[in-house]
Image (cartoon, rainbow, N blue to C red):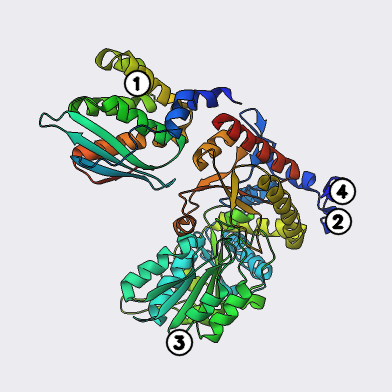
Amino acid sequence: MNAMGSMMTSKAGDNSLQAFDVARIREDFPVLKQEVYGRPLVYLDNGASAQKPLAVINAMKAAMDTCYSNVHRGVHYMSQRSTEAYEGTRETIARFLNARSSNEIVFTRNATEGINLVANSYGRKFLNAGDEIIISHMEHHANIVPWQLLRDQIGIELKVVPIDDDGNLDMQAYADMLGPKTKVVAMTHISNALGTIVAIKEVIDMAHEAGAVAIVDGCQSVPHTAVDVQDLDADFFVFAPHKLYGPTGVGVLYGKEDLLNDMPPWQGGGDMIMSVSFEKTTYQNAPLRFEAGTPPIVEAIGLGAAIDYVSAIGMDNIAAHEEGLLHYATSKLSGIQGLKIIGQAKEKAAIISFIMDAAHPHDIGTIIDRAGVAVRTGHHCAHPVMDRYGIAATARASFGLYNTMEEVDALAYAIGAVQEMFS
Amino acid sequence: MFDDLRDLYQEVILDHGKNPRNFRRPDEFTVEALGNNPLCGDALVVYLSMDDEKRITDIAFQGHGCAISMASASIMSELLKGMSVNEAEALYKAFHDICTGEKEADDVLVDFGVETAERLHMLSGVREFPMRVKCATLPWHTLDAAVQGEQEVSTE
């Protein structure tokens, strides 16, 4: 990783792998210049939400400064420009995920809403009592609870693929679970609590062989690795723009166009209709069918800027940088006595959950916070994962494109302070 | 970096956190309640034994949580034993107000004595850590729930 330090001569806009210059990238994020408690901010809570580059902040400001209006409604100049920017982002997302068409990109409020949309719309139309949905033991609550609600409404069964002690998905158990009753496989691409990278393409292939559709929770994968929905052959795929250095308030659901157009609307209102009378209403095709009401216009535009930003750097370059951080942090933290890393899957993203003999995760979080280090503490909206390991909570460091080896050192130093405090 | 942390994690707190007193499930008790903090996963059960005159004859707890919540439960169990339920409720309210900054620990001096005031003052270090106030108050909310006859309470 010394390579990174020697690349200080790169030119602006030159973001090839050889030029991955984390110092320059950090300049793009105003918040990172901040000090907390008199110490430089070390932001390692990217798995919860990532910081925003100037490109995103400026794009959102510019949208409101110059072309803000409601979309799809007016013939006036401002509405046209706003609509172009909003729909332009849809095109940007389609290219970013390699969707066949921007008609496959639905804007939602957040990733959670995307899963709820599929559960409610696809689930209620195509699933019947006795059908089975398969999820994994390491799902975020957002990919558990919507299916439980559906289960309680229509009497389907929820099956859970186990994980081993290291956090690897039990593929054999998954294969055994699949059957003629399986209608939906809903699986995370990367576990938010453990960092496990699931062999999602294989999971999807196997789902298809069983005649099921596959929905992928890509919240932790999209910010950290290139995703090609056609290559994966995912039927549905959701991600959270705010974890991709974009704004909150907007989410993305990808769905195959023919599937989306076979699905009934989930929410009703303006923008999603073709015609309305009191007797009968006809609906737009996807994606507008699923976008009732005024959408998050400025947020969508901000997301477009975030995608342009990470694309210019290159998702593969970001993945390589974060892999370096993961390896360094893993070796650094593994060497700390009394610290145990929860989740040591063969394929891992730059997420390290850990517990300590000396202190509860919340005490760890509070103490290292005073050293300027922000990590997540708690159950990470993944109670079943915590139960699997017989713990109530972990501390979790999750890395992003702007994190550095020095920040890993700062984390390790702060953990030393925890030990000192509790010795 | 350590100064304000030392106010929170005082020796006494660390000691109670590591070796909580009255950490047990009594064979007999009058009421119990489960306290949950769904945000962080802390959970504890408070067991209360009372005599006919509603005096607390025994108080114990079990559960898991951070050093602050365990220490608060432990100290609470020591403070409340022997009090009437009404006194315990008054102290619960006072402690709540101390943690949220509406009262000072000294305000309980007259009614509850120096030692109690000192103990509450120790726990009130959470005032400087707003995200941790719930850790300190969870055992007390659970106690209140037990007294009120509620079986479960949650804070977040």
Between A292 and A256, the residue placed more toward the observer is A256
Instruction: Kindly identify which residue carries mark 1.
Output: B103
Q: Secondary structure at mark 3?
A: loop
Three-letter code, disc 2 = Gln
- The CA distance from mark 4 to mark 3 is 55 Å
- Could you say where residue B78 lies in the image, as x and y percent from the top left? 31, 27
Local packing at callout 3 (Cα closer than 10 Å; few below 14, some 14-19, many 20+) is: few
For disc 2, the chain is A
Q: Secondary structure at mark 1?
A: loop
Local packing at callout 4 (Cα closer than 10 Å; few below 14, some 14-19, many 20+) is: some
For disc 1, the chain is B
- Could you say where residue B65 lies in the image, as x and y percent from the top left? 42, 41
For the residues beneath circles 1 and 4, the answer to whether they share a chain is no
Q: Which mark is residue A180?
A: 3
> Answer yes or no: do the residues labelled 2 and 4 have beta carbons within 8 Å?
yes
> As displayed, is residue A126 above or below residue B4?
below
